[in-house]
Amino acid sequence: MERPVNSINTQSSLILAAIIVILLIAIGAWLVYRKRQSQRLEKRFGPEYGRAVDELGSRAKAESELRTRELRVDHLHIVPLLPADATRFSQAWKVLQGGFVDNPKGVVAQADQLVRELLLKRGYPMGDFERRAADISVDHPGVVSNYRAAQEIAARAQRGEADTEDLRKAVVHFRALFDELLEVETALPASTTRRKMETES
């Protein structure tokens, strides 16, 4: 027995309506996800987010670039410094800074080199400057602008276009990054480590 045409039309309409509702829910969920991702990236990268948008011309391109940076840095083996290494780097900085009055241009070059050594010790690869800055921006977005400013002044200094005040600013910028990178490995007391192991077993 054939079903009435009205019944078939009603059933088709219900199926179509269900498909549309599912599609709308999926689109809504995707939009919410994208918005949360944007908010997460903006919060994590701070001013670097705005810089990426300006440089790449759109939020979508900027967010894709920032996610790529996150994935790349996730695969690096970034480690804190051992206390002895942190002390050595701190002392090296004091010596370097003490020579600024007599040799400001040389101290800027030394500061740049010391920051590179510290980055290498922490596990950052030494690619070109833009790659280093991009990698740093993932975990240290607040000071990557200092690094860029310091590098720009250092480049001008090499061309003889930076005065003493510029060089002083470069050292201050390098110092901001240097201080943040001096992350020291903190060992848990033996009793705490034992309790942690017992809890996990």
Image (tube, rainbow, N blue to C red):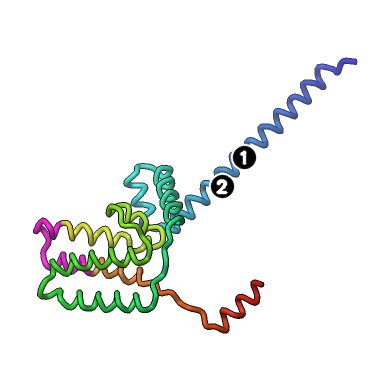
In this picture, residue 182 sits left or right of residue 32 = left
The x, y position of residue 181, in whole percent, is: 35, 68
Is 30 drawn above or below residue 201 in the view shown? above
In this picture, residue 87 sits left or right of residue 36 = left
* Residue in the picture at 42% in, 52% down: 72
Say whether residue 162 is magenta. Answer: yes
Disc ID at residue 26: 1
The quarter of the rendered structure image containing the N terminus is: top right
The x, y position of residue 186, in whole percent, is: 45, 77
- Residue of label 2: 32
The residue closer to the viewer here, 185 or 158, is 185
Residue 13: name its quadrant: top right
Disc ID at residue 62: none
The count of marks equals 2
Is 24 drawn above or below residue 14 in the view shown? below
For badge 2, the amino acid type reads Val
The quarter of the rendered structure image containing the C terminus is: bottom right
Residue range in magenta is 156-171
For badge 1, the amino acid type reads Ala
Is 170 drawn above or below residue 5 in the view shown? below
Which secondary structure class fits the magenta region best? Answer: helix
Q: Earlier in the sequence, mark 1 or mark 2?
A: 1
* Residue in the picture at 70% in, 31% down: 17
The x, y position of residue 48, in whole percent, is: 36, 55
Say whether residue 62 is magenta. Answer: no
In this picture, residue 80 sits left or right of residue 111 = right
* Residue in the picture at 49% in, 55% down: 40
Give the secondary structure at mark 2. helix
Give the secondary structure at mark 1. helix
Is 163 drawn above or below residue 49 in the view shown? below
The residue closer to the viewer here, 69 or 84, is 84
The x, y position of residue 26, in whole percent, is: 62, 40
